[in-house]
Image (cartoon, rainbow, N blue to C red):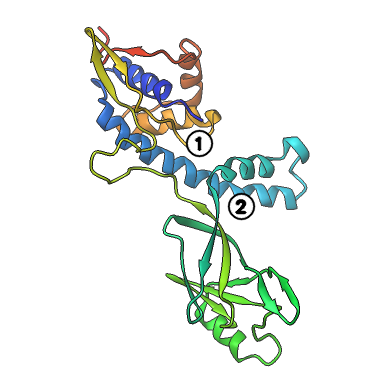
């Protein structure tokens, strides 16, 4: 995962170099979580472009496939949960950001017990047409779900569903005294030297997104950077170190 210490030190030094003062750990933590969400949203959006490239024959395929690479990175945020359906309604997972698929869980139909793919509908008018239809009405073999603030499942005899989805990055834990924020930087004074504590937690994005995270955080501070600048600077201090100084460079 992207090393939060390396990202912090790089942003801090680049901000100092640009004569913008210096960035504190608390400010960095707020900006870092916002930057992670921005890069995550960009990653989700890139699925559409990657899929279009594949359909247009522009994707090289196999290990060079852009779509495959994006899906591998997003798999870090993939979750699967089983929700109980009560009176035809199931709750959305509280951390769900983008739905991938829904299947029934061990639906009993006759003598068979198999999970069935559930058709997902977001339009209330469309679900009304489906329910009124004599040809495409939901059945045990062809279940349908209307997704809104809850998940309505048809037919209503279904008792459990499996939900696959992409969750949001973890972000800030609001519990009092919590040190489980992601990402998170904490620095303490040790014999006159400021060092990172063991409470630091890395970003949830892979290391390859470090430059994007640095650029996004720097932009929030007011420093406009290009990837080439970040790469050039990062090459000077690629290995993260434990000891840091918050004093601006002179």
**Which element carries disc 2, helix, strand or loop?**
helix
Please identify the quarter of the rendering in which residue 173 is found.
Answer: top left
Q: Position of residue 120 (x, y in %)?
A: 59, 70
Q: Quadrant of residue 242?
A: top left
Q: Residue at x 46, y 21 (%)?
A: 230
Give the labeled residue for mark 2.
48
Q: Position of residue 139 (x, y in %)?
A: 67, 83
Say above or below: 14 vs 82: above
Q: How many marks?
A: 2
Residue 131 x %, y %: 59, 87
Task: Please state which of the two labelled residues, at mark 2 or mark 1, is closer to the viewer.
Answer: 1
Q: Quadrant of residue 193?
A: top left
Q: Is 97 situated above or below 72?
A: below
Provide the secondary structure element on which disc 1 rests.
loop
- Taking the spot 71% from the left edge, 89% from the top edge, the residue there is 135
Disc on the earlier residue, 2 or 1: 2
Where residue 28 appears, as percent x and y from the top left, is 31, 30
The residue nearer to you, when weighing 76 against 7, is 76
In the image, is 212 to the left or to the right of 53? left
Foreground: 142 or 230?
142
As drawn, the label of residue 205 is 1
- Binning the other alpha carbons within 10 Å of mark 2 as few (below 14), some (14 to 19) or many (20 upward) gives few
């Amino acid at each position: 995962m992207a090393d939060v210490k390396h990202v912090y030190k790089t942003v801090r030094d680049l901000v100092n170099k640009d004569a913008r003062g210096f960035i504190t750990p608390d400010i960095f933590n707020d900006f870092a979580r916002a930057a992670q969400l921005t890069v995550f949203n960009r990653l989700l959006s890139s699925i559409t472009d990657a899929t279009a490239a594949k359909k247009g024959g522009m994707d090289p395929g196999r290990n060079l496939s852009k779509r495959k690479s994006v899906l591998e990175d997003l798999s870090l945020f993939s979750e699967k949960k089983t929700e109980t359906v009560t009176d035809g309604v199931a709750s959305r997972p509280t951390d769900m950001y983008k739905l991938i698929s829904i299947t029934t869980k061990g639906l009993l139909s006759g003598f068979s017990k198999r999970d069935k793919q559930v058709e997902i509908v977001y339009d209330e008018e469309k679900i009304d047409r489906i329910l009124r239809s004599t040809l495409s009405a939901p059945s045990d073999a062809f279940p349908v779900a209307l997704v809104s603030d809850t998940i309505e499942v048809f037919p209503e005899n279904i008792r459990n569903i499996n939900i696959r989805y992409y969750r949001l990055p973890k972000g800030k834990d609001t519990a009092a005294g919590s040190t489980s924020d992601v990402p998170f930087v904490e620095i303490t004074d040790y014999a006159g030297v400021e060092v990172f504590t063991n409470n630091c937690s890395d970003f949830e994005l892979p290391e390859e997104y470090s430059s994007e995270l640095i650029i996004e955080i720097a932009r929030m501070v007011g420093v406009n950077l290009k990837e080439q600048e970040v790469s050039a600077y990062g090459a000077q201090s690629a290995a993260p170190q434990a000891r840091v100084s918050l004093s601006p460079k002179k």
